């Protein structure tokens, strides 16, 4: 009896898509609550959760949702963890500018920099990942530049 060779394809660290979508919904809901109540500090919650995800790779919203999984995470379609961290970095940056704008009394800045990640989350929930597109184009640019310099 012969044994099948082990797969030589390296496993890319990933996050199950239901967790990513749950994080999108929570972020979107908190931003909407912040607008409705006119309480900018509520936008600091996704700032912190996405910031933790971007900085150390641990998002408390995703961690909480993962505790309620019934099936093994590998049974879901997933997103590359590096892509998720990139998206969370973009979200963190925009929300940080939004909170600073609110603290400085620039209401328009607060709304501009919370609407952008809200639209990105809506797009992701609809199936188009703006952060994925930006990262793809950035990687293409870096690769072309490296080839031109060689």
Image (spheres, grey):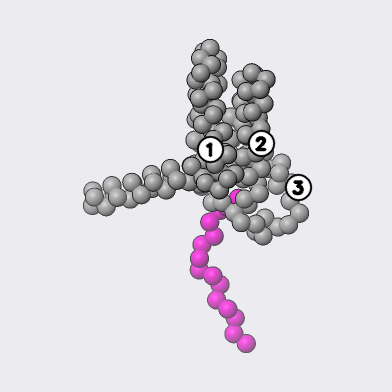
Observer-nearest of 98 and 32: 32
Answer yes or no: is residue 69 visible.
yes
Q: How far is mark 1 from mark 2, CA to CA?
A: 13 Å
Q: How far across and down, in percent of the image, does residue 105 sit?
A: 53, 12
- Circle 3 is placed at which residue position? 68
In which image quadrant can residue 65 be found?
A: top right
Q: Which residues are magenta?
A: 1-15
Q: Residue at x 70, y 57 (%)?
A: 72
The answer to whether residue 12 is left or right of residue 41 is left
In reply to whether residue 63 is colored magenta, the answer given is no
What secondary structure is found at the residue carrying circle 3?
A: loop
- Measured in 3D between alpha carbons, the distance from the residue under mark 2 to the one under mark 3, in whole angstroms, is 15 Å
Q: Which mark is residue 120?
A: 1
Of circles 2 and 3, the one toward us is 2
Q: Residue at x 27, y 52 (%)?
A: 147
What residue would you read off at disc 2?
26
């Amino acid at each position: 009896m012969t044994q099948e060779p082990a797969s030589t394809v390296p496993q890319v660290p990933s996050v199950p898509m239901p967790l990513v979508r749950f994080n999108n919904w929570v972020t979107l809901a908190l931003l909407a609550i912040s607008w409705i109540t006119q309480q900018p500090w509520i936008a600091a919650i996704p700032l912190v959760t996405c910031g933790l995800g971007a900085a150390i790779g641990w998002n408390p919203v995703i961690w909480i949702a993962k505790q309620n999984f019934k099936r093994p995470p590998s049974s879901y379609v997933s997103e590359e963890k590096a892509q998720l961290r990139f998206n969370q970095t973009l979200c963190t940056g925009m929300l940080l500018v939004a909170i600073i704008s609110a603290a400085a009394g620039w209401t328009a800045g607060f709304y501009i920099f919370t609407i952008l990640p809200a639209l990105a989350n809506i797009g992701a929930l609809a199936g188009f990942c703006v952060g994925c597109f930006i990262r793809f184009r950035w990687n293409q640019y870096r690769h072309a530049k490296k080839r031109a310099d060689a």
